[in-house]
Image (spheres, rainbow, N blue to C red):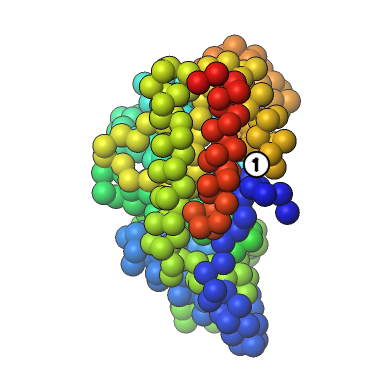
Amino acid sequence: MPKIPFNIPYLTGAEEAYMLDALRSRAHCGNRAYAERCIALLKEKYGFHAVFLTPSCTAAMEMGAILADLQPGDEVILPSYTFSSTANAIVLRGAIPAFCDVDPATMNIDVSLIEELITERTRLIVPIDYTGIPCDIDAILAIAKKYNLLVMQDAAQSIHSFYKGTPCGGSAPLAAFSFHESKNLSCGEGGALVVNDPALVERAAFLQEKGTDRSLVLKGLRSKYGWIDLGSSFLLSDILAAVLLAQIERVDEIVAKRAVVTSAYFNLFDPYGEQGLLQLPAYPDHIQVNHHAFFVIFDTAPNRDTFLKLTGQKEIYPYSGYVPLHSSRMGRKFGYEPEDVPVTEDIAKRIVRLPFYTDLSENGLDYCISGMQTVLEQIYHC
Ligand SMILES: Cc1ncc(COP(=O)(O)O)c(C=O)c1O
């Protein structure tokens, strides 16, 4: 294993016992005992209205896109600076992405640019919470209300982040979380669709269960279930839900450990930020982050590339971040040119995501910081 990889999934210690218990229960499919416990805990901790555990955040957003009733030709506003899944969920329904630029302070969607992208065909806005920094969800919901649009928050990275005291994913009608191994809470591959609009909950259960009304049979409301809607197998096996429960139960401790990494990175990079050489994330006063990740924007692309190269030589592995969607091969098929989303296009060449994992707070952080310090001194001679 490299000295400081980009990510190592965390184990709380309870995973093995829970997983074995789930295995021995002989009830392994979705929505069984451990799923129910995860769902109850997520609702209790974060006040979500309804939670559906899914095989990934990707699957949760695909389920959300069906639930949003997207039709071919509908337009969806989303940042270009995001993961392919945010766009694929809507493109799979035949909808057209309208890529919005980002605010460099947070790398989240620039709310001031949303209204100019709205047309008669716009149906949905899908903001993300980059590195766990909440997007400006109140402003986005206000725009959505004004134009009668739906919002699905891609909260892949922001479980346990808060916006004005409200948990991320708690106020949009739809929100999708990731429990992939790279996230704060992991069961390897996993996700959740949060449905806060009560009018959408019943149908969500049909979509999750392959387009059947099996959920009504389980509630004793039908004697037989049948095919009544679109859908897929949007379910997380209870064996993985057992792993997830072990993690959700310890979320406060996980986030506290990760906060140590954020502080160390601010201490290291602040002096360079103060000299205008680097730009660090800005956490507005009204948010509380979950310390999912940390990014730094270099002054020039060559300095960013040198940083990646020299840290790699020390077996410290930061990562160059997303390739903007609008200028990727798929984005160009929708007619986009790189200059159409200029801030994203520019910053994508200068940004790095630093190694970030829960264990780093106790193992390797000093090496990581001193290695990066040496590299920064080589680049900036200070
Ligand atoms: C913003 C965003 N959305 C969606 C995803 C996809 O999550 P998953 O791997 O759980 O499908 C990711 C994964 O990193 C992400 O960063």
Front-most of residues 268 and 201: 268
Front-most of residues 137 and 96: 137
Front-most of residues 331 and 368: 368
Vertical order, 341 against 283 (above or below): above
Q: Quadrant where the N terminus lies?
A: bottom right
Examine the image and state in which quarter residue 244 appears. bottom right
Vertical order, 186 against 274 (above or below): below
How packed mark 1 is, by other alpha carbons closer than 10 Å (few <14, some 14-19, many 20 or more), is many
Residue located at (61% from left, 33% from top): 321
Q: Position of residue 272 (x, y in %)?
A: 45, 24
Residue located at (39% from left, 40% from top): 134
Q: Position of residue 161 (x, y in %)?
A: 38, 49
Residue 241 visible in the shown view: no
Front-most of residues 359 and 290: 359
Examine the image and state in which quarter residue 227 appears. bottom right
The residue singled out by tag 1 in the image is: 316
Residue located at (57% from left, 51% from top): 364
